Image (spheres, grey):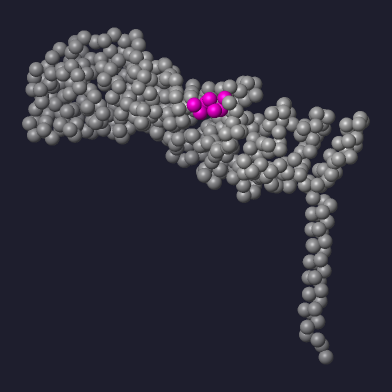
Amino acid sequence: MNDPSRIYRWLLLVASLVTIIYLVSAAVHENYLAQWKTVQREYLTILQQKATDDRGRELLAKFRVEMKQASIPALGTVDRCVTCHNGIDDPRMTDVPQPHRTHPGHILDKHPVDRFGCTVCHHGQGAALTFNEAKAEDVFWDYPLLPPNMTEATCVTCHDAEKLPPDQIPLLVVGMKLYQEKSCGSCHKLGGRGGTLGPALDNEGAKSKHQLIMTNLKPPHTTWSWQNAHFRDPGGVVPGSLMRNPTVTRPETLALTVYMLSQWKRDVPESYLAPDKIEQKYRALHPTPLTGEQVYRQYCTACHGNGAYTRWDKKFNRFIPAIRGVSLVSTASRDYLQANIEQGRPGTQMPAWGPHAGGLLPEEITGVIEYLRSGATAAAPAPALTLHGDAGNGLSLFLRNCAGCHGMNGRGGMAPEIGNPVFQQAAPDEFIIRTIRNGRVGTAMPAFQRPDAPALGDQDIADVLAYLRTLDSHRGQKAIAQNTVTAAPSGGKP
């Protein structure tokens, strides 16, 4: 009689044998063929070759094939990198292959592994015991191992970059300089100073790949790969990005990437901070004001260029005013410029730069105003208009002559928003009258009272001014009700 359980007993036997084979294989691999043990046996062979004196033979006798680690509770890390990198502090290992070679430079002289570990500088998964897991690019780990040329980004954790020897942080030095030269602060805040069009960058280096859009990025999906690609083509990496292409070379892109990785507010015990880092923290609380030219170059040039001429911004499809143009600075008062800088232009790309917004100090705003006005000659007062303006006729004239650039209601056009509340409150009548009459040299704003072909008479200008003042929410309703306004230079804020 056939036994129906026979087949199941055979299956159980085979499965048991396979399980035993796997268990034995795992035990052999764990205890004899583990990657770190293979590496240490290779290092033991090198030690035997290097043991040519008493000290060498002593080191050979003390060496044990075993797991090694540096436990640093103050930094919240356990680093087992020294399990494979056994020769990092042995000067005899300068000519051997990795991972046995001595650490380059003299960093370990002041940064011993038993106090600092490895990942505080190099990142990576310190508790790993295989190269792939330690590198951590393709595993679930927030901060993979940095490429060797980018590890200088972590020096600012404990040091002030401006006090370190430039030859030790060459990319970081270039990145810092480029950040200022490219006027990145026009759109980004750093240390509480900068524009608001883009995100603040104070903790950019702490971001993991999970916080970045990787859809359009080829592997490896690391934060530095993202930064590198983003600097070359912002819109290609982040669809719809408002960031202009900074037009940088590949070496410059690498330098900016290192600078971004260095922006990490990592909390480390004060005992780990170098004296220059503590001094840097003090200076951040008591900053030295920049000169007007420095402020302009760091926070204005990305949009305004040299400021001498108006220019068409293809990114935002509008003209950027010539804020250093002779027509503006010879006409605009200091109060007008100060109001526009401190308060910005709400609803436009021009942010507020006051101490509680863009972070500029009062003396820096004064300095940049003087820089804008440098070389300009104050204009003579505009001839008074004692005519009463008709806001209704002014609307017709505005739609016919002005709305094409300035937009309906003075908002949303290609040219400056003259219906903007900051403009309305800061610009005196005299300023508006002179601008309509004489235009703006070097811009698309024409003169409407040219001697050879005047387009608008004095009454027309009075009517346009009357309409423009209805755009100010603080006084517009009153002007509309009266339908008139007296157009005469006020000599100050209206």
- Is 285 left or right of 229, judged from the image as shown? left
**Between residues 280 and 494, which one lies in front from this camera angle?**
280
* Residue 231 place in picture, x, y as percent: 53, 32
- Is 100 left or right of 445, judged from the image as shown? right
Q: Is 68 in the magenta?
A: no
Magenta segment boundaries in residue numbering:
276-282
Instruction: Tell which residue pokes out farthest to the bottom in this image.
Output: 1
> Which residue is painted at 9% across and 27% down in the image?
484
Q: Is residue 374 visible?
A: yes
> Which residue is painted at 88% across and 38% down in the image?
60
- Is 229 left or right of 470, judged from the image as shown? right
Residue 327 higher or lower than 359, as above or below: above
* Residue 35 place in picture, x, y as percent: 78, 47
Res 216 → quadrant:
top right
**Between residues 5 and 276, which one lies in front from this camera angle?**
276
Q: Is 277 in the magenta?
A: yes
**Count of picture labels:** 0
Q: Is residue 252 visible?
A: no
Res 383 → quadrant:
top left
* Residue 301 place in picture, x, y as percent: 42, 22
* Residue 105 place in picture, x, y as percent: 72, 26
